[in-house]
Structure formats: structure tokens, C-alpha cells
Image: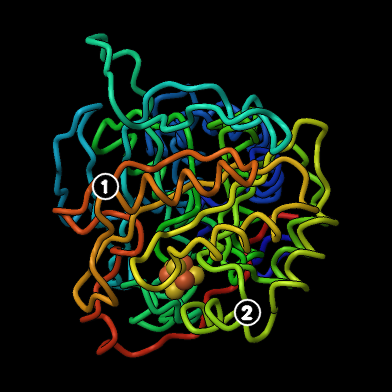
């Protein structure tokens, strides 16, 4: 049997479905299944269990649900941790049902104002070195952001990135993306307040599944993440940006990995720039539907000798000028297994931040977290997976 209007065969993984889609599928599967599905959905999303037997239903109903639906939690292979000033950064290595490992990272963040509250380029420079310095003794001042993977590997080939060295092995399905969140919450007890698609993979290269996952993650009958708590990060995938723009979810956060603001340098480190050069990317971002107080995140990985000159800061300012409110997230380069250069020293970081601010840009410095456990930006991935056979990307998610 196939769910009406979808290509998905049974059993359906509930983690890839909104509550409405689950209810519709349950109604199709058995009489009164719709109402039971409504009761089951929150428990599936929060506890990762399909506990039909917890409800006063017949044995046949339990059997029918088990036949038609499943909850695809991922296997936790291992967790590695790095204690830090604000809390422990932890990387979970999770295994899909077909044996691929994906990684997601829990990052402690000092509780701050949302991005939308940060002042724009016309404001005087503010101290946005938010992750540095004083920590209150109150651990409740820490929020946790989960950095999610959207693909096994990535085909974008950014030269500074460990995942890029793997190539694309396959997309994750919407259910698998949601399962990262449900698995770490249910199996590891991780509190997760914010979600950022900045783990393995280019999220917008897998836009259909990512968008379906967004619909599930924000479903008010389930995990109910607000759009403001979710950030999509992209290297500049034009087709994916068009799909995301068509959603018209103006409260969703968006960030772009810039890393160089002249075409020659950017094409060298980010091959996507050859397909979508900076002027075209700038045009797409300027046209992106924005809420009134929208702030575009601009991620800049500082690589000594490659993109840290005075002119580079000027180029970043010129690129950002037509984009409205922006916030530069300055990320010191994390050398991985095949380093392009060294990590920048403190003087180089402070100097570059100073230049950006001179040019009127608000800057938030990302303190390096998780470098010792290969969980920092650009360090996720297992190059060994390149030896595994590629598989055809999974079917589209079954939710309208
Ligand atoms: S930085 Fe992002 S887009 Fe670039 S190769 Fe790595 S995972 Fe892919």
C-alpha cells in the first residue's frame, strides 16, 4: 500500500511526517486511526517511541500501527566531548539504517539576543564577541545549539572542509534529519534550543528533504521549533535558495558561507563560486524575502595568508552593502587532517575584526569549540566513507 499523494511505501517513518500527514496516513490505514495518530505524534517526536499500546486501543489497532508506521531513530555509535568555558561541546556520531555515519554537534552558547536584535551596518560598532570572556556561574545562561547534517558527505568541494573531501555519498531523508534531533534528545538527553544546518553537507543541495524536515521540526503538534530558532546555512546554492525563498518563511534565519569576497579567491576555496559568482549571489540574497528586522548571517572563516588582508575586509563590506542588515560571524580556521594553512593567531583575528568594524560591519567572533574532537567548523566527516559505495539518493519525503 502507498500513502495517497506520495511516493513512499509503507512502513512510513513518522519522523518524516507532519502531524497532519501522519493523521491522514493513519486514517487511510485503519478506522479511527486519525484520532490515535494525533495522540501518538507528540510522544513520537519527544520520546522517539511509537507506544500505541500505552493507549486504550485494541490489539488489532496496535498491530496495524506497527505494520504501517515506524520511528527511525538513528544508532548512537559514539559521543565525544570537549569541556569548555560555557559548557561541553559534544559530537554524536550516528548511524543510518544502511550503515552510514553522520555527525551532529551540540554547541554550548551563552544565552544572547536573537540575531534579529543585533544592530545593522549603520549602527556604531558593538561588542559582538559574544562567545568570549566572562561566563556567569549560572549554567542556566547556556543554551545549546545542535549543528545538523543534511547529507552524507558533500559535493560542493570547499577546500577547507573535511566533509567536502568525502564527496557526496547520499542525501539524508527528511526523516533522518529530524531523527538527528529526536535521537539526541531521546537517547542522549541533550537539551536542544536552536538548530543550525551547518553540519555535514550543503543543506540546499538537499533542499526538498531539508524543507520537509523544517515542516516537521516546526510542527506545532510536535517539536514546535519556532522559525527564529532555526538557521539554514548555505555555501550559495542558487537553486536551493530559490526553493527556500519560495517557502516565504520570513522568520527563518539564513546564513551564507562567504569566506572570500572577490571571485578569484572565493572560486579557489569554494568551487560553487564558479557556478554562482559573487555578483549573482549578491543579487539573489538582496532579493531574498526578508522580515522587517531580518539579519543575514555572513560566515567568514579566517585563513591566514588567504583571506585576511585589509583589502579582503573591504571586499566583504562591499559585498554586504546592498544586503540590508548583516552580522559577520568570524570563524577562526580550524586545521583538519589536511590543513590548507595554520589557525590564525589572536592578533590576526583582532586585527581583521577591527577592519570589518572600521568598514561599518557588526561582527561576532565565534570562539573555537570542539577542535580537539574534530567537531569544529569544517572538521566534520569521515574520509573513510569515501570507500563505501554511493547509493541513489532516497525518495522524496511523503508530505505535501
Ligand atoms: S563547507 Fe559546507 S558546502 Fe562546503 S564542502 Fe563543507 S559541508 Fe559542503
Give the residue displayed 34% in from the left and 21% down from the top. 142
Q: Nearer the viewer, residue 276 or 360?
A: 360
Give the x, y percent position of residue 303: 36, 65
Where ligand 1 lies, by image quadrant? bottom left
Q: Quadrant of the C terminus?
A: bottom right
Give the residue displayed 71% in from the left and 45% down from the top. 24
Give the x, y percent position of residue 321: 75, 52
Q: Nearer the viewer, residue 130 or 359?
A: 359
In the image, residue 10 above or below residue 115: below
- Disc 1 is placed on an element classified as helix
Instruction: Describe residue 58's horizontal placement relative to residue 324 as left or right.
Output: left
Give the residue displayed 31% in from the left and 72% down from the top. 162
* Circle 1 Cα neighbour tier, 10 Å, few/some/many (<14 / 14–19 / ≥20): few
Q: Nearer the viewer, residue 301 or 21?
A: 301
Q: Can I make out residue 187 in this image?
A: yes
Q: Quadrant of the N terminus?
A: bottom right
Disc ID at residue 263: 2
In the image, residue 385 above or below residue 45: below
* Circle 2 Cα neighbour tier, 10 Å, few/some/many (<14 / 14–19 / ≥20): some
Question: Disc 1 marks which residue?
Answer: 346
- Rendered image quadrant of residue 93: bottom left
Give the residue displayed 40% in from the left and 37% down from the top. 145
Q: Nearer the viewer, residue 242 or 138?
A: 138
Q: Earlier in the sequence, mark 1 or mark 2?
A: 2
C-alpha distance separating marks 1 and 2 = 27 Å
In the image, residue 266 above or below residue 38: below
Instruction: Describe residue 258's horizontal placement relative to residue 109 as left or right.
Output: right
Q: How is the image coloured?
A: rainbow
Amino acid at each position: 500500500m502507498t500513502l495517497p499523494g506520495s511516493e513512499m511505501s509503507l512502513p512510513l517513518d513518522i519522523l518524516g511526517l507532519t502531524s497532519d500527514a501522519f493523521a491522514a496516513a493513519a486514517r487511510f490505514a485503519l478506522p479511527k486511526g486519525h484520532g490515535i495518530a494525533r495522540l501518538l505524534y507528540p510522544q513520537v517526536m519527544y520520546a522517539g517511541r511509537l507506544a500505541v499500546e500505552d493507549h486504550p486501543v485494541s490489539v488489532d489497532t496496535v498491530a496495524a500501527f506497527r505494520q504501517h508506521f515506524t520511528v527511525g531513530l538513528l544508532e548512537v555509535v559514539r559521543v565525544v566531548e570537549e569541556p569548555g568555558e560555557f559548557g561541553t561541546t559534544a559530537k554524536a556520531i550516528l548511524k543510518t539504517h544502511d550503515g552510514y555515519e553522520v555527525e551532529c554537534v551540540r554547541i554550548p552558547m551563552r544565552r544572547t539576543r536573537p540575531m534579529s536584535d543585533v544592530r545593522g551596518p549603520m549602527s556604531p560598532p558593538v561588542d559582538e564577541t559574544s562567545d568570549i570572556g566572562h561566563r556567569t556561574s549560572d549554567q542556566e545562561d547556556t543554551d545549546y545549539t545542535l549543528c545538523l547534517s543534511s547529507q552524507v558527505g558533500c559535493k560542493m568541494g570547499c577546500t577547507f572542509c573535511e566533509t567536502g573531501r568525502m564527496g557526496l555519498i547520499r542525501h539524508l531523508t527528511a526523516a533522518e534529519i529530524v531523527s538527528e534531533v529526536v535521537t539526541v534528545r531521546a537517547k542522549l538527553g541533550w537539551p536542544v534550543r536552536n538548530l543550525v544546518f551547518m553540519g555535514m553537507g550543503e543543506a540546499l543541495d538537499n533542499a526538498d528533504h531539508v524543507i520537509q524536515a523544517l515542516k516537521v521540526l516546526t510542527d506545532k503538534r510536535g517539536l514546535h521549533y519556532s522559525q527564529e530558532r532555526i538557521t539554514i546555512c548555505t555555501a550559495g546554492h542558487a537553486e536551493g535558495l530559490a526553493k527556500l525563498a519560495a517557502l516565504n518563511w520570513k522568520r527563518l534565519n539564513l546564513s551564507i558561507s562567504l569566506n572570500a569576497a572577490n571571485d578569484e579567491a572565493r572560486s579557489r576555496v569554494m568551487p560553487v563560486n564558479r557556478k554562482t559568482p559573487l555578483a549573482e549571489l549578491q543579487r539573489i540574497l538582496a532579493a531574498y524575502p526578508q522580515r522587517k528586522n531580518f539579519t543575514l548571517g555572513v560566515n567568514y572563516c579566517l585563513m591566514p595568508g588567504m583571506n585576511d588582508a585589509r583589502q579582503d575586509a573591504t571586499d566583504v563590506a562591499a559585498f554586504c552593502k546592498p544586503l540590508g542588515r548583516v552580522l559577520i560571524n568570524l570563524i577562526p580556521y580550524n586545521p583538519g587532517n589536511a590543513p590548507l594553512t595554520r589557525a590564525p593567531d589572536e592578533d590576526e583575528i583582532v586585527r581583521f575584526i577591527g577592519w570589518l568594524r572600521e568598514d561599518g560591519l557588526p561582527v561576532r567572533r565565534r570562539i573555537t569549540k570542539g577542535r580537539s574532537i574534530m567537531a569544529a567548523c569544517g572538521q566534520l566527516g569521515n574520509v573513510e566513507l569515501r570507500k563505501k559505495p554511493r547509493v541513489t539518493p532516497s525518495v522524496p519525503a511523503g508530505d505535501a
